[in-house]
Image (cartoon, grey):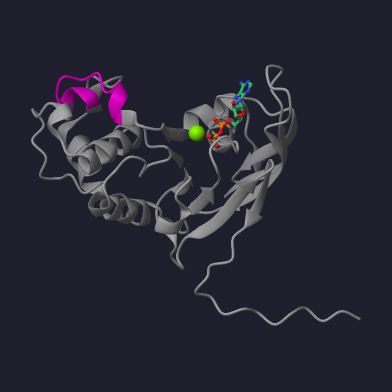
Amino acid sequence: MLELKKIKYHPATALNPILTDVNISVNKGTPLVIAGASGSGKSSLIEIISGLSKPQHGYIRFQGKIASERKRRSISGVVFQFPERHFIGLTVLEELRLGHRRLASDKIDETLTKVGLSSLILKSPPENLSGGQQRRLAIAVQLTRNPSILLLDEPTAGLDWSVRGEIIKVIKDLSSNIILIVVTHEPQIFQDSKISSYQLNNGRLIKTIQPHKTKEPPCQTN
Ligand SMILES: Nc1ncnc2c1ncn2[C@@H]1O[C@H](COP(=O)(O)OP(=O)(O)O)[C@@H](O)[C@H]1O
Ligand SMILES: [Mg+2]
């Protein structure tokens, strides 16, 4: 389990705090989708979780133990927004092997299968793939590191509606074996009873009530 407690993030360069009191618990099995408007702090939250930034207050635990920035970097895979703009491999194989020159071919096959790209030709230039395939390749690149936590920043941004379903399927398939957090400004495409959804607003996370769920009776007060 990954737990964030009372996270406050206020870098010296920001006039106001970006995150003021963020609390989350995430387990494998249920992907967490965090929605928020542009500038609400979604990417900053990903940077905090993955250990790229340090919060001013609060702490993060992984499997019950406090996880330092260094530890979080080692256990996190991050797919930043528009990852295809940063592909530098000349082929799919080169992209997968960046940083792991000796990545075994069975590991490559296994990783591509996890993101639904098992039939991909490894010699293809990444720029020849479809938008959805490119996003899935970027996820596969992170999976080669065997992360315990996978963080996706706006994974459906700029994709056609027809392709978005591919990404949502991959997110659901992967989440049974990994702690998965998605941040997005398009929450409506992630409405699903198997997805836990939150809204980031004024630096705080608020659980989103799924519209199709029946309303629970109000709590009784004494
Ligand atoms: N290191 C930083 N220093 C100053 N301001 C920052 C820094 N990082 C993010 N911000 C500001 O914090 C706000 C949230 O940014 P960001 O996390 O990128 O939001 P989102 O991903 O939801 O669009 C924005 O107003 C952004 O300009
Ligand atoms: Mg962002």
Residue drawn at x 64%, y 49% as measured from the top left: 24
Q: Is residue 202 left or right of residue 156?
A: right
**54 relative to 172, above or below:** above
Q: How many marks?
A: 0
Residue drawn at x 69%, y 22% as measured from the top left: 14
Q: Quadrant of the C terminus?
A: bottom right
Dividing the picture into quadrants, the one containing residue 87 is: top left
Task: Please name whichever residue, 189 or 99, is drawn nearer the observer in this view of the structure.
Answer: 189
**212 relative to 182, above or below:** below
Residue drawn at x 47%, y 58% as measured from the top left: 30
Q: Is residue 191 left or right of residue 71?
A: left
Residue bounds of the magenta highlight: 84-95
Dividing the picture into quadrants, the one containing residue 98 is: top left
User: Is 137 contained in the magenta span?
Assistant: no
Q: Position of residue 211 (x, y in %)?
A: 52, 70
Q: Is residue 110 left or right of residue 48?
A: left
Task: Please name whichever residue, 185 or 138, is drawn nearer the observer in this view of the structure.
Answer: 185
Q: Position of residue 189 (x, y in %)?
A: 40, 57
User: Is 88 contained in the magenta span?
Assistant: yes
Residue drawn at x 65%, y 54% as measured from the top left: 206
Q: Is residue 94 visible?
A: yes
Q: Is residue 64 visible?
A: no
Q: Position of residue 12 (x, y in %)?
A: 71, 17
Q: Is residue 65 left or right of residue 56?
A: left
Q: Residue furthest right?
A: 222
Quadrant observed for ligand 1 in the rendered image: top right
